[in-house]
Image (tube, rainbow, N blue to C red):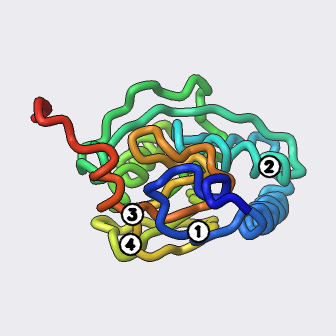
Amino acid sequence: MNPRLKFPYEFIGEILITQEQIQQRVADLGEQITQDYQHSDKLLLLGLLRGSVMFMTDLMRHIRRPMTMDFMLVSSYAGTESSGFVRIDADHKTNIYGWDVILIDDIVDTGYTLYTVRKLLLERQPRSLKICALLDKKARHKVDIHIDYLGFEIPDYFVVGYGLDIDEKGRNLPYIASVDLEKYKKLYPPDEGKK
């Protein structure tokens, strides 16, 4: 097998979670959510763009309940580090008052993003609000955050694939892989003009 096909980006370290493992876990989460919300008539999946798109669309296929979806566009990363400042670039359109809301994110790093968005959403008085994340880097948490539905806990690696990116690279990989940051910096040196 051509290694360039397996690793289409030269900065990939190793595959941490395979495509098959992801699909099985997403199916399990969908089944659990189906059971937990079997009596809900107003279920909303609210995805945080852009990283959650692949996870959320796959997850929806495994939820056997009437439901709707919406998105928020938030940002907190600059390169490979969370800035700690969460900016809401585009808000959701659905009035979530009285809804059962599941907030969907790709990865919990410091926890600032979910902590901030959760606080905002609770002020809008949903009937319930739970958090679902594909990945959790527990070692990096800076705030106390409870994840109700979790795909995988991972070590403190920068990862790409299945919607996650590094400067918009790697989102299209079907698996979760670590980034070799030394290789990445050599391939894509920081712009000297940026401050």
Q: Nearer the viewer, mark 2 or mark 1?
A: 1
What's the amino acid at mark 2? Ser
As helix, strand or loop, the secondary structure at mark 3 comes to: loop
Q: Residue furthest front?
A: 2
Residue 57 % position (x, y): 73, 42
**Real-space Cα distance between discs 2 and 3?**
44 Å
Residue 160 % position (x, y): 51, 54
As helix, strand or loop, the secondary structure at mark 1 comes to: strand
What's the amino acid at mark 1? Ile
What's the amino acid at mark 4? Asp
Asked if disc 2 and disc 3 are in contact, CB closer than 8 Å, the reply is no
Nearest to N terminus: mark 2 or mark 1? 1
**Real-space Cα distance between discs 4 and 2?**
36 Å
Asked if disc 1 and disc 4 are in contact, CB closer than 8 Å, the reply is no
Residue topped by disc 2:
40
Q: Is residue 39 above or below residue 93?
A: below
Nearest to N terminus: mark 1 or mark 4? 1
**Real-space Cα distance between discs 3 and 1?**
11 Å
Report which quarter residue 89 is drawn in.
top left
**Real-space Cα distance between discs 2 and 1?**
37 Å
Work out whether residue 152 can be spotted.
Answer: yes
Residue topped by disc 4:
156
Q: Nearer the viewer, mark 1 or mark 4?
A: 1
> Image check: 49 left or right of 1?
left
User: Which residue is found at the position 63% from the left and 50% from the top?
Assistant: 173
- How packed mark 2 is, by other alpha carbons closer than 10 Å (few <14, some 14-19, many 20 or more), is some
Quarter in which the C terminus is drawn: top left
Residue 172 % position (x, y): 62, 44
Q: Nearer the viewer, mark 3 or mark 4?
A: 3
Res 15 label:
1
